[in-house]
Image (cartoon, rainbow, N blue to C red):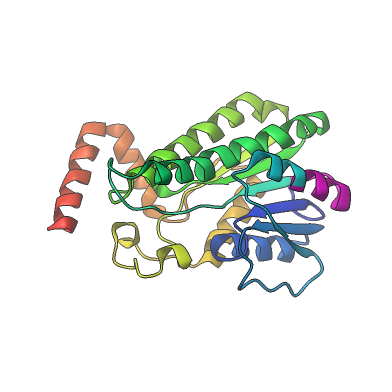
Amino acid sequence: MEIENKVIVVTGGSGGIGQALAMSFINENAKVVIVIDINFDNFVSETNKLISKFCDVTKEKELNRIIDEINLEFGLIDIFCSNAGILSLGNEQAPIEDWNKNWSLHVMSHVFATKKLLPEMLKRGSGYFVNTSSAAGLLSHIDSVTYSTTKHAAIGFAEWIAITYGKRGIGVSILCPQAVDTAMTKGRENEVSALDGMMKPDQVALDVIKAIKEETFLIAPHDQVLGYFQNKANNYSRWIGGMQKLRQKLKS
């Protein structure tokens, strides 16, 4: 999938990884990049190729309306980046409101976008989804059951789409970084996700650009994540034991 002259949408794009993605797409000569978010307080566009639109992507009808609007204004969407996310810390006693927010944003927003976009993409035989999960989706986040569980589910959904439609022209990538220097991680520089360092959003965006061009499914900007993932697969029980020890160490 080439990026030049493509119509691209980035959700959660007014800051952090989303904003870096949007600017990287502009630098790759995309036709237009539409940033979707619910807060544009600190967002500034310096080019008419970067468009902002308000939308709560957890509401299917609202997202469908915005997609229809984009298709009419700019042409059919080629690449859709489901990047919006939240982090709610807590264990199994987390309130149902936290579960619902995480499920709606980390899973169902991906489902809604795919339901809407896939039929037309299949007609064209071309389209690309970049779904932001997290290293927590491949591994775990010891401080958040809601985040870990829903990010795992996001990977499962992306896998299914890739398996089912990958031979029909549909590309899928999952973005699985550890800690990235964004508003979400502010004040959490010493937490478990940052043990291997805090990456800059611009570097993450460059990895995404490369993955789209090469049609790579798993994007793991932190090199250590692939090693942890392989260790998990090689000996799941041993990996669980290691995570238990890490949790005890960090909580002591």
Q: Is residue 190 above or below residue 6?
A: below
Q: Residue at x 76, y 36 (%)?
A: 126
By secondary structure, the bulk of the magenta-drawn segment is best described as: helix
Q: Residue at x 21, y 32 (%)?
A: 237
Pick the residue in front: 229 or 201.
201
Q: Quadrant of the C terminus?
A: bottom left
- For the N terminus, which image quadrant? top right
Q: How many marks?
A: 0
User: In this rendering, is residue 144 above or below 48?
Assistant: above
Name the residue located 75 percent from the left edge and 75 percent from the top edge: 46
Query: In this rendering, would 60 be left or right of 226?
Result: right
Q: Is residue 207 visible?
A: yes
Residue 135: percent from left, percent from top? 41, 48
What percent of the width, then of the height, locates residue 21? 62, 60
Residue 146 at x, y percent in the picture: 37, 43
**Residue 235 seen from this side:** no
Question: Residues in magenta?
Answer: 66-78
Identified at 55% across, 35% down, the residue is 158
Looking at this rendering, what residue extends furthest in the left direction? 252
